[in-house]
């Protein structure tokens, strides 16, 4: 939903006026906001930073949506999150049975989980490891996750493996920390994945 | 005088007629009179009008005009009359009838105390094989004027998983029935099929009360007959119905009561808090077809080959103990060098006499006694107990692509050999097995003249789990002296799919048994393991032929004791 209505949300915020925005932004970036308050360049700067914040939020929501669909086995819904559904790579469909945020690893990696604005007052280019390109239309992220990897039983498991597959249990499950390398593109209807890579096991 | 009726063919081998819908319709006309019964029918319902409401299922309004006639209105439609049969067990009334002019009917369990109902909606001609009874289960209640509908329902359960019973119906039919799974069961038909082999069928288990349960199996891939009953754990008794066509295509439609004996319980492996109210099928999608459920149908897996295909496959590829093993040997025992440098003769009674030279841990030479030329072969060996070695190899050039799987006890001079061959009268790439007993002749070994290993029934009734490698675990149920079943676990540890095949058991030493099983009508594999009940570990050899060639491969797994059914007395009575 976030990627689908980000434009209208942004419009609402700007209709409400820049002054109304200073308060919430000040909570995270007081110095930067007050220093540029009241000038044309500061409005543009605010607009740009707000857009970036909203982009980060939209991408974060996209990531969460991906995890939800993966965990429910909703493969078609996963495909719909990709700019090119055929890039919903096989690893998502067949190997990763569950995905969840690895908050500890994110924290260790310096990702400001849950905080959209960094202490410097700059848009949080590394919030959740999300980095927005300067063109504002592309982004990348390194997602620290706990992945439950489901590896299909070896074919040389013979009859037992065949029976296990037939009853839906033909996989070996194990959990490991992974860093998913994600790339994104902003489309007219919001952000989509362009690539998502799981490092080899 | 022979008292046991052995069949011409066992169930895996019977070519059940592909009955047409018209043939089934014709044969079902007799059901208008209701099911037969060896015991007097119950009149518990006579004179009553019963309206049954089910969740997401039919509304059924019955008028029971006598102890064997009723009229039924389905979902408010015009009433039809037909015959029925009812029997009671404790607080339950069970009745069965077919719907005239159709291939469908109802088998219904009413708990008279709680008013809860389970309806088995059954029909023919709903699958590729018309004769296979299909079923859909609905839970509901008896709707009574002025009474609030009960909130609870009967439901599927794991509460009787692991149980086993001997049953004798009022018509004299005796069976052993084991429940090692939450959606399958294992049965030994002592009367109809002589009790030699056990078979597996998809099965429903429904909890009525803490001591009353519904069991319903459909002999899928065989006759397609439905056997459904309510069983009372406390009184070890049952009432139920049998509906379908036997191997002569004769209609069986009768209600029965029976008396049973618990034969024990096996361990179960689902979490303690899991009551089995759902069956976790992982990523398996059950199709939307009415009555659909997971059914193991191994003969539909396109694995069978012609003799020419087998010969070509064997010529093209032979995989003998490939480096790295396989998923079936992930927990294998260490490969033994016990035989390296030894020479010996394997002298089998009324069987081959084979001379060996073991040149390395994987290289041996063999020749039949009297031959001059040695044949090189790759082998693998394991020392299961001090002085007891299992090894196996192919017999290159043998017309039936033979393999030998040998257990040699060097401390006692004894040997047992399973001679595997490829091809049966039924399927060209289905393995067959012959068992030979004999001796080994080697330096320092004094072989006995008369003493031999022997077939054993020590394991019969036992269940052992086998963990071959991560994610690959099964349970063997040594279900008769001549067969075993293997059960696959669901993700939550409950028993799932199973199949069975002929087997034999040979005692090698105390707590050490040589077991083989044939995956009959199911991939054709000959599995052979040496079970060490002291270490709860096995070693063994799988032998099979598929489109990718002939395979001889290691088996090795860790075991857990899953209990034992006390069943030998039933086979002894059946002259086994």
Image (cartoon, coloured by chain):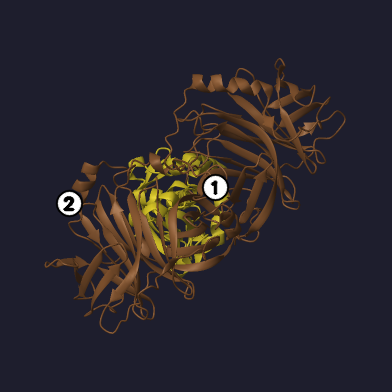
Chain colours: A yellow, B brown
Say whether residue A28 is left or right of residue B368: right
B473 vs B368, left or right, is right
Local crowd size for mark 2, using a 10 Å CA cut-off: few (<14), some (14–19), many (≥20): few
Q: Tell me residue B161's x, y (percent).
A: 62, 54
Q: Residue A190: image x %, image y %?
A: 43, 42
| Residue farthest along the top direction in this orientation | B78
* Residue B469 makes an appearance in the image: no
Is residue B215 rendered to the left or right of residue B444? right
Q: Quadrant of residue B140?
A: top right
| A92 versus B327 height, above or below | above
Q: Which residue is mark 2?
A: B315
Is B487 located above or below residue B375 in the figure? above
Q: Nearer the viewer, residue A40 or A183?
A: A183
Q: Observer-nearest residue: B103 or B196? A: B196
> What is the residue that sits farthest to the left in this orientation?
B372
**Which image quarter: residue A178?**
bottom left
Residue B551, numbered label: none
Judging from the image, what secondary structure is the residue with disc 2 in? helix
The answer to whether residue B437 shows anywhere in this view is: yes
Query: Residue B108, percent across and down?
Result: 70, 34
**In the rendered image, which residue does mark 1 sit on?**
B1
* Residue situated in front as seen by the camera: B92 or B151: B92
Mark 1 surroundings: few (<14), some (14-19) or many (≥20) residues within 10 A:
few
- Chain letter for the residue marked with disc 2 in the picture: B
Secondary structure beneath dot 1 equals loop
For mark 1, name the chain.
B
Disc 1 + disc 2, Cβ < 8 Å: no
The image shows residue B318 at horizontal and vertical percentages of 21, 56
Are tags 1 and 2 found on a single chain?
A: yes
């Amino acid at each position: 939903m976030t990627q689908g209505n980000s434009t209208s949300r942004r419009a609402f915020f700007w209709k409400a006026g820049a002054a109304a925005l200073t308060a919430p932004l000040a909570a995270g970036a007081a110095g930067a906001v007050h220093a540029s308050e009241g000038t044309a360049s500061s409005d543009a700067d605010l607009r740009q930073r707000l857009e970036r914040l909203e982009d980060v939020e939209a991408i974060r929501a996209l990531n969460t949506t991906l995890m939800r669909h993966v965990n429910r086995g909703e493969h078609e819904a996963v495909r719909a999150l990709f700019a090119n559904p055929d890039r919903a790579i096989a690893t998502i469909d067949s190997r990763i049975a569950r995905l969840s945020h690895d908050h500890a690893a994110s924290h260790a990696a310096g990702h400001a989980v849950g905080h959209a604005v960094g202490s410097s007052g700059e848009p949080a280019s590394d919030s959740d490891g999300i980095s927005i390109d300067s063109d504002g239309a592309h982004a990348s992220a390194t997602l620290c996750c706990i992945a439950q990897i489901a590896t299909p039983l070896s074919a040389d498991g013979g009859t037992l493996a065949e029976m296990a597959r037939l009853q839906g249990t033909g996989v070996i499950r194990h959990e490991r920390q992974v860093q998913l390398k994600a790339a994104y593109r902003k489309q007219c209807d919001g952000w989509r994945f362009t690539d998502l890579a799981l490092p080899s096991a | 005088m022979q008292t046991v009726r052995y069949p011409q063919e066992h169930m895996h081998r019977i070519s059940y007629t592909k009955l047409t819908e018209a043939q089934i319709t014709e044969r079902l006309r007799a059901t208008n009179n209701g099911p037969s019964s060896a015991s007097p029918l119950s009149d518990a319902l006579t004179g009553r009008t019963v309206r049954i409401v089910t969740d997401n299922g039919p509304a059924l309004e019955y008028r029971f005009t006598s102890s064997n006639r009723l009229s039924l209105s389905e979902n408010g439609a015009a009433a039809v009359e037909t015959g029925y049969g009812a029997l009671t067990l404790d607080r339950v009334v069970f009745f069965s009838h077919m719907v005239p002019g159709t291939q469908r009917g109802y088998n219904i369990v009413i708990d008279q105390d709680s008013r809860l109902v389970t309806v088995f909606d059954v029909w023919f001609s709903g699958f590729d094989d018309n004769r296979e009874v299909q079923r859909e289960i609905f839970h509901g209640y008896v709707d009574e004027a002025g009474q609030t509908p009960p909130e609870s329902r009967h439901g599927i359960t794991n509460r009787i998983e692991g149980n086993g019973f001997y049953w004798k119906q009022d018509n004299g039919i005796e069976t052993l029935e084991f429940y090692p799974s939450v959606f399958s069961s294992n049965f030994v038909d002592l009367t109809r099929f002589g009790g030699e082999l056990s078979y597996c069928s998809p099965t429903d288990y429904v909890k009525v009360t803490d001591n009353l349960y519904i069991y319903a199996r459909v002999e899928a891939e065989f006759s397609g007959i439905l056997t459904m009953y309510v069983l009372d754990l406390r009184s070890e008794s049952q009432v139920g119905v049998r509906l379908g066509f036997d191997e002569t295509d004769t209609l069986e439609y009768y209600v029965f009561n029976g008396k049973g004996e618990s034969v024990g319980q096996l361990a179960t492996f689902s979490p303690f808090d899991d009551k089995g109210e759902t069956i976790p099928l992982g990523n398996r999608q059950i199709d939307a077809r009415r009555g659909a459920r997971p059914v193991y149908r191994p003969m539909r897996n396109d694995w069978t080959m012609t003799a020419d295909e087998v010969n070509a496959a064997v010529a093209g590829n032979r995989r003998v103990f490939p480096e790295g093993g396989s998923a079936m040997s992930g927990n294998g025992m260490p490969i033994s060098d016990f035989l390296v440098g030894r020479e010996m003769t394997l002298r089998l009674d009324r069987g081959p006499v084979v001379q060996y030279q073991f040149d390395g841990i994987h290289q041996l030479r063999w020749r039949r006694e009297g031959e001059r030329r040695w044949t090189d072969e790759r082998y693998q060996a394991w020392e299961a107990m001090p002085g007891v070695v299992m090894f196996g190899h192919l017999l290159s050039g043998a017309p039936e692509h033979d393999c030998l799987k040998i257990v040699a006890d060097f401390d006692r001079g004894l040997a047992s050999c399973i001679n595997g061959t490829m091809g049966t009268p039924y399927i060209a790439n289905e393995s067959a097995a012959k068992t030979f007993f004999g001796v080994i002749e080697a330096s320092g070994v004094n072989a006995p003249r008369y003493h031999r290993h022997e077939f054993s029934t020590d394991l019969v009734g036992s269940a052992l789990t086998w963990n071959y490698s991560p994610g690959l675990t099964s349970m063997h149920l040594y279900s008769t002296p001549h067969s075993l079943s293997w059960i696959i676990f669901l993700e939550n540890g409950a028993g799932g799919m199973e199949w069975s095949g002929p087997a034999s058991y040979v005692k090698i030493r105390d707590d050490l048994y040589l077991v083989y099983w044939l995956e009959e009508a199911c991939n054709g594999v000959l599995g052979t393991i040496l079970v060490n009940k002291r270490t709860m570990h096995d070693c063994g050899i799988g032998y099979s032929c598929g489109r990718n060639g002939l395979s001889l491969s290691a088996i090795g797994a860790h075991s857990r004791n899953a209990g034992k059914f006390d069943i030998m007395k039933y086979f002894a009575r059946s002259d086994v």
